Image (cartoon, grey):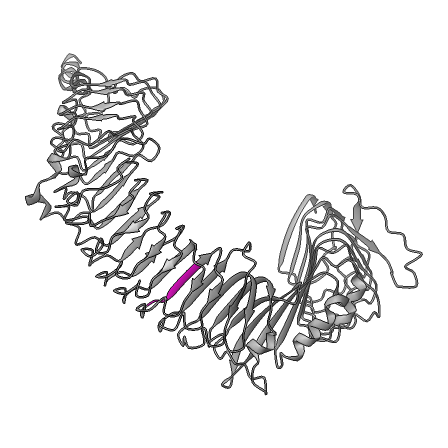
Amino acid sequence: MLLTLVVILAFSPTGALECPTKCRCSNYKTWCRYSRLQTLPLHLAATTLSLSIHYDDIKKLNTSMVSRTRLNNLTHLELNSVQLQQIEPGSFKYMNLLKKLIITNNNINRLHADTFKYLHNLHYLNLKQNKITYLHDGAFLDLVNMRYLYLEENRVPPLPANVFYAMKNNSKCKAMKAPGVLDINNKFSRFPSHNFGAFQQLCSFTKMSISGSTSTSIAKDAFVGTTRVRDLKLSFIPLVELTNIFNGLEKLTNLQITYTNALNNIEIGALENLTALKYLELSHNKLTSIRSGTFRCLQSLKVLKLDYTNISIIEKNAFKGLESLESLSLEYSKLTTMHDGIFESLTSLKELFIRASIIEQIDPDAFNSLSQIKIIRFFVDYNNKKIITLKNNTLSRLKTLSVVHLSVFKFSVEAGAFPEVWSIQIFSKNITHRLEDVYYPSINYEFALQRVTCVIMATFGDIHIRANVKSVQGHHTIHELYLLIKGEIPILQKQVYELLENMLNFTYLNIKITGLNSFETLASLSDLQISHLDISNCNSVNFKANSSFRFPNIQSLFIMDSKMLEIHTNAFTQLKSMMYIKMSHIQRVAIASGTFIGLNNLKVLEFHFNDGIVTIPTWTVSSQNKTRLPKMNKNITTTFEAGTFLGLGNLEILVLSRNGNISLTKAMFEGLHNIIEIDLSWNGIKEIIPGVFGAECVEYFKLSCKKCI
């Protein structure tokens, strides 16, 4: 026994291993939060590789504290919101294997020389939100393998010229392959001007993000030697003029200069060294014009964004040199005219986005040079009351154009303005053109836009039109036509019929009606070959027996978001082709036995999310005055009368979910011989009696009840 005890003591550490309160510990990882720690934990396993501490009170780091932890093998250390105020030079002497160090949201106000001494293996350092106001020369000494350095949201002063000296090892840079990031983002605390010379010869990083300086200019040689930088972002720096500051960035592929709030000019030749650039953004600046030669030598550029500027003038040949450009964005500019040849040289452009508030004129040849264009999105602010005219052949020469989105307040389209596109969307409060001039210019009404699959228009006041088109034996005809009608039908009826007279041979006609006050007027559309009818946001929807509501080709009917729905006995006898009925989100639903007689082809019937359902044994026009509907009350239990679903012999799916309180009767589902699925969930059903589901074909039930027998 004594020998065993001696052996144990001989091989035990000087103190017992302990996991601090509110920490989670393993042999390799420890995570602490609100643990009331005032120092690094002293009794963790020596095998610990990762230590994370959040929301504690460790005000100082020094060599003595770190040495006592015995965390010599630590590779990951995170100290977040621990009230840290000071890191003494050389504190990490006994943590020289660290690869990742995160010290964020603390109160450190300065980094002394040798702060990170001995951390030769460190490649990731995050010092975000630490109130740093001073960096000594040598603060980052020994960080020879640094790849990711984040200094965002501090109060960084002018950078000492040699602050990044340890990272300027050109011999190592040649062998580097891994990416690296330098982020100095101080946009919330306007620090004094940078000594941009600190970035010279800084070859450790492939991405640099610098913001928040008060510098109004950057030296020409500021980035000399930054040979590995591929991505450069400069923001919230009040540059007045962009000059040639990019010497040494010949391999740069992504450049963003945004939110300068002062930049009003780009010097000719300022960008000529960036021959490898693929993405350029100069948004949120005060640029007023694009001069000829501005983008010369950018033969590799693919994307150019010039959004939120004061650009009102684009000179001829302004885009010369951008023969490889594929996407151009000019949103929220001050353009007034799109003149002939404005996009000259953009022979590879595929996407064009324009949003302007005061544009007044589009010349017919403005887009002619866009031989590869596929998408044009053009928006004009609705505050601009000027009528924008799209003249004949403005877009028709663009053989590759497939999508056009136009949004203006007043818009005039001349016949032949559109090319053979796949999709056109026009959103406007006042479109002054005849629809058939655009879509059916030929005498025999063959579809002129040979490749159109979707056309969206807003015209004829409150009628919204969409058409889907398909090819049938080489002829392109309307496959599906959608009409969205807002308001009273009699007022719009003449316009609807005039519209449809010019649209021949469509297969499906779908109509959605919203805000209808009188349901009686719906019968005026009965002569149309409607395939789908969608009624919503109406006061009263009333289906009477033997009414003029006859749509022999209708296949689906949706009634939603309305106040009241009343369906009489034999109301649907004329709807022989109906296959799908959906009625939801209605405040009051009243149906009668025999309501669904005649719907022999109906496959799906849905009643759900209604406030309540009233059932009446028999309800006809003659008995209507004698029938008093009970007031709706969420506490009233609805009992479905026998024969409610008579006539639905081919129904396969019945959904009666979320309709208040329902009581099931034995004869409720009489006649449903081919039913496969029944959903009765969330109806306050208290009991399901034996035999209520007499159908033999039911394969799927969805129920929720307090007592199921």
Main SS of the magenta segment? strand
Q: Looking at the figure, which quarter contains the N terminus? A: top left
* Span of residues in magenta: 349-354
Q: Position of residue 676 (x, y in %)?
A: 64, 63
* Picture layout, residue 476 above or below residue 102: below
Q: Please name whichever residue, 597 or 416, is drawn nearer the observer in this view of the structure.
A: 416
Residue 151 sits in which quadrant?
A: top left
434 to the left or right of 641: left
Q: Please name whichever residue, 645 or 623, is drawn nearer the observer in this view of the structure.
A: 623
Q: Position of residue 496 (x, y in %)?
A: 69, 72
Q: Please name whichever residue, 440 or 287, is drawn nearer the observer in this view of the structure.
A: 287
From this viewpoint, is residue 107 visible?
yes
374 to the left or right of 599: left
Name the residue furthest left. Answer: 171
Q: Position of residue 302 (x, y in %)?
A: 29, 61
Q: Residue at x 26, y 22 (%)?
A: 109
From this viewpoint, is residue 26 visible?
no
How many numbered marks are there? 0
Q: Please name whichever residue, 283 or 577, is drawn nearer the observer in this view of the structure.
A: 283
251 to the left or right of 188: left
Q: Position of residue 649 (x, y in %)?
A: 73, 68
* Magenta region includes residue 46: no
Name the residue furthest top. Answer: 2
Residue 140 sits in which quadrant?
A: top left
Q: Residue at x 76, y 42 (%)?
A: 634
